[in-house]
Image (spheres, rainbow, N blue to C red):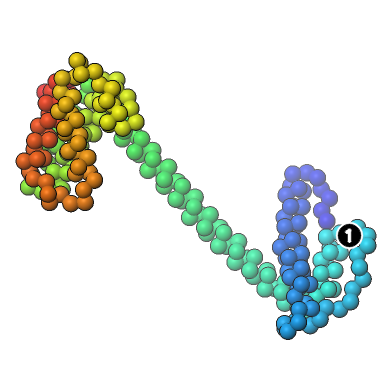
Amino acid sequence: MPSDTTLPGAIGWALWFSSELAFKWLPGTAVALLGGHAGSAFAPAPQVPAITNPVTVTQVADFLRASSAPGVYDELFRAWSSLVAISIVLSLILASILIYCLVRILQIRRAEYRRFEAYAESVAAGDVPKVHLRWNRVRDQANSDNVQNWRLAVLEADIMLKELLESLGYRGETMADKMRVVDKTRFNTIDLAWEAHRFRNRIAHESSMHSISAIDVRHAIALYEKVFREFKFIE
């Protein structure tokens, strides 16, 4: 048994003990248990003297070898070695996959955070050209003949409404929470915002857009526009 108490020595001792456990104790215990099992392929275990004094790891391994049927310990030792090697390889592969997935998730989260921060900074700084560019795209999508574009237009307009509410200092976990705390004396178009947001929820939770007409979509976009113009969010 290694006796060095330094850090490398401790690591070496841990590796040595692990190998003793994996390659000697466990297979030896299995052999000892199976060696005298009736009807199995193992021969009855020979008689061995009882252990009455403190023993070392090596003595325990020798005892397990002696208590097993002849030749069975070595055969199981070789099979056990292969199993441990395969397990280590599979563990390394799975650990690599796990690490890769965690890294990718962190990268995606960082990208989303940067995008949300860019939107927030745009509103806080009054980046009018960028807001106008977004709003022009919303209107183009709403005026198109593509049903999917209608859905994207309403969802983007609702995101802009969320940014407007936050820039005005309204806080809440959801859009509904933000609008509930609005002071109606300072937000004349809050009822229009509610109507537009309810329409957004309708198309967001429906699996099909076939029941929604272009007139409904353009009416909702017009409601969003009135809200934005009240606060000069767009011009």
Above or below, comparing residue 24 to residue 41 in the picture: above
Query: What residue appears at the point 49 percent right and 50 percent down from the top-left corner?
Result: 99
Which residue is at the front of the view, 155 or 193? 193
Above or below, comparing residue 135 to residue 85 in the picture: above
Which residue is at the front of the view, 123 or 29? 29
Give residue 21's position: percent from left, percent from top: 74, 61
**Total numbered badges shown on the rendered structure:** 1
Give residue 223's position: percent from left, percent from top: 12, 30
Give residue 29's position: percent from left, percent from top: 76, 68
Q: Quadrant of residue 7?
A: top right
Query: What residue appears at the point 60 percent right and 64 percent down from the top-left corner?
Result: 87
- Helix, strand or loop at label 1? It is loop
Above or below, comparing residue 86 to residue 209 in the picture: below
Q: Is residue 69 visible?
A: no
Query: Which residue is identified by label 1?
Result: 55
Give residue 233's position: percent from left, percent from top: 17, 23
Q: Is residue 68 visible?
A: yes
Quadrant occupied by the N terminus: bottom right
Quadrant occupied by the C terminus: top left
Q: Is residue 120 left or right of residue 151?
A: right
Query: What residue appears at the point 19 percent right and 39 percent down from the top-left corner?
Result: 200
Label 1: how many residues lie within 10 Å, few (<14), some (14-19) or many (20+)?
few
Q: Is residue 44 left or right of residue 188?
A: right
Which residue is at the front of the view, 189 or 158? 189
Query: What residue appears at the point 6 percent right and 41 percent down from the top-left corner?
Result: 215
Amino acid type indicated by mark 1: Val
Q: Quadrant of residue 125?
A: top left
